Image (cartoon, rainbow, N blue to C red):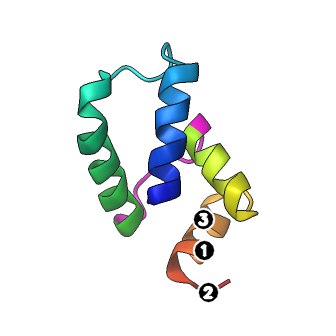
């Protein structure tokens, strides 16, 4: 989540038109994404997800992300 949070901050600055929430709501958005990751109910198409996957060297697919999150890699 630390890497995702850092990448989300970067994505918010670089692509403000694609992220419709104000910067001060960032902690809430990050917490909601943590819950979504745990539930397996998230979108994998955003810039922050893409950069996070690249950071960890995994594909930007649900299978790869879920496998990584479970620690089955």
Left or right of 31 on screen, residue 40: right
Residue 53 visible? The answer is yes
Badge number at residue 68: 1
| Pick the front one: 5 or 68 | 5
Q: CA distance from mark 2 to mark 3?
A: 10 Å
Counting residues from the N terminus, which is met first, the one under dot 2 or under dot 3? 3
Q: Is residue 67 magenta?
A: no
Q: CA distance from mark 2 to mark 1?
A: 6 Å
Q: Main secondary structure of the magenta part?
A: loop
Badge number at residue 72: 2
| Pick the front one: 43 or 71 | 71
- Which residue is at a point 50% across and 45% down the rendered structure image? 6
The residue to which callout 3 is attached is: 65
Find numbered disc 2 in the image and state the secondary structure of the residue it sits on. Answer: loop
Say if mark 2 contacts mark 3, CB within 8 Å: no
Q: Find residue 64 and report its horizontal and vertical position in percent.
A: 67, 67
Compared to residue 2, the image places residue 67 above or below, namely: below
Badge number at residue 60: none
Q: Find residue 56 and report its horizontal and vertical position in percent.
A: 69, 63
Which residues, given as a range, are shown in magenta? Answer: 39-47
Say if mark 1 contacts mark 3, CB within 8 Å: yes
Say if mark 2 contacts mark 1, CB within 8 Å: yes
Compared to residue 34, the image places residue 50 above or below, namely: above
| Label 2: few (<14), some (14–19) or many (≥20) C-alpha neighbours in 10 Å | few
- Which residue is at a point 52% across and 73% down the rendered structure image? 69
Left or right of 42 on screen, residue 66: right
Q: CA distance from mark 1 to mark 3?
A: 5 Å
Compared to residue 8, the image places residue 59 above or below, namely: below
């Amino acid at each position: 989540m630390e890497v995702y949070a850092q990448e989300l901050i970067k994505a918010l600055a670089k692509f403000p038109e694609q992220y419709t929430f104000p910067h001060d709501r960032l902690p809430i958005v990050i917490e909601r994404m943590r819950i979504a990751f745990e539930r397996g109910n998230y979108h994998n198409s955003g810039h922050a997800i893409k950069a996070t996957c690249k950071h960890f060297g995994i594909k930007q697919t649900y299978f790869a992300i879920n496998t990584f999150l479970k620690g089955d890699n």
